[in-house]
Amino acid sequence: MKILLDAGHGYETPGKRSPDGFREYEFNRQAAHYCRKILELAGFTVMDSHSDEWDIPLSERTGMANRWKADCYVSIHANAYGAGWNSANGIETYVHTSRPAEALKLAQSVQAQLVKETGLADRGVKAADFHVLRKTTMTAILIECGFMTNKTECGLLQSKEYQQLCGETIGMALLSFYKPAGGLYKVQAGAFSQLKNAQSLAGKLRENGVPAYITYS
């Protein structure tokens, strides 16, 4: 399985910053990094379309994916509404306006997992004629992981914990959707009657680079 990860934009892309100067690419690249680690551990082949040196043009990103014959293109972003702080909030995932069946199912899966794990508002799966969705020849989705123009969500986007949570959640959603040959081994680290105790252990595991997710049964 070949996954093309696209951390949107670049460090110096004009306008892609929060009102207090946080660069969107700082979140995008870190989330993509954690996503890549999850996918590679499962045996997937992963390529990045982005660069820390410059903002690679969209046509080059999609051309790279098409030449490589990727099975899936995943573009990771942080959202914005206007130029100043406001109340717009939540997570949304995009597919192309032609609404390809597989892309739509994948987007719904990723969206559901991100909303569940982050606790942010569910803005749903939407359709748009974005270049990376229009010019790719494989299944493609674009994910918006929260608003840089919302003070609370901007704080999350700047935190390592949230970057890791989003990246790993996207990665696990991809693994669940595409199901690696041979399956996955899972490790349970604890069981608690109180949510705060489960959250505490999950946080400690993530600090040590171990993907951790909370389920209730």
Image (tube, rainbow, N blue to C red):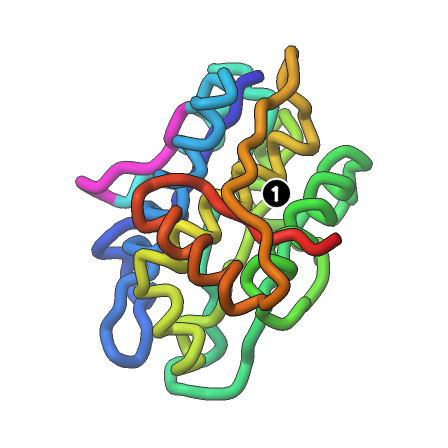
Q: Position of residue 92 (x, y in %)?
A: 62, 61
**Magenta segment boundaries in residue numbering:** 47-54
Name the residue located 52 percent from the left edge and 59 percent from the top edge.
198
Few, some or many residues within 10 Å of mark 1 (<14, 14–19, 20+)? many
Question: Is residue 54 at all visible to an observer of this figure?
Answer: yes
Which residue occupies the foreground of this view, 83 or 210? 210
In the image: residue 19, left or right of residue 124: left
Q: Residue furthest right?
A: 101
Quadrant in the picture for residue 119 = bottom right
Relative height, residue 25 to residue 135 (above, below): below
What main secondary structure does the magenta stretch of the protein show? loop
Q: Is residue 51 magenta?
A: yes
Name the residue located 42 percent from the left edge and 80 percent from the top edge.
152
Q: Total number of numbered labels?
A: 1
Quadrant in the picture for residue 12 = bottom left
Q: Position of residue 164 (x, y in %)?
A: 39, 50
Q: Position of residue 187 (x, y in %)?
A: 54, 33
The quarter of the rendered structure image containing the N terminus is top right
Regarding mark 1 in the picture, which secondary structure is present there? strand
Relative height, residue 133 to residue 40 (above, below): below
Which residue occupies the foreground of this view, 195 or 63? 195
Name the residue located 46 percent from the left edge and 32 percent from the top edge.
38
Q: Is residue 190 magenta?
A: no
In the image: residue 13, left or right of residue 173: left
Name the residue located 41 percent from the left edge and 59 percent from the top edge.
162
Q: Amino acid at mark 1?
A: Ile
Q: Position of residue 125 (x, y in %)?
A: 71, 56
Q: Which residue lies under the disc numbered 1? A: 141
In the image: residue 47, left or right of residue 53: right
Question: Is residue 58 at all visible to an observer of this figure?
Answer: no
Quadrant in the picture for residue 49 = top left
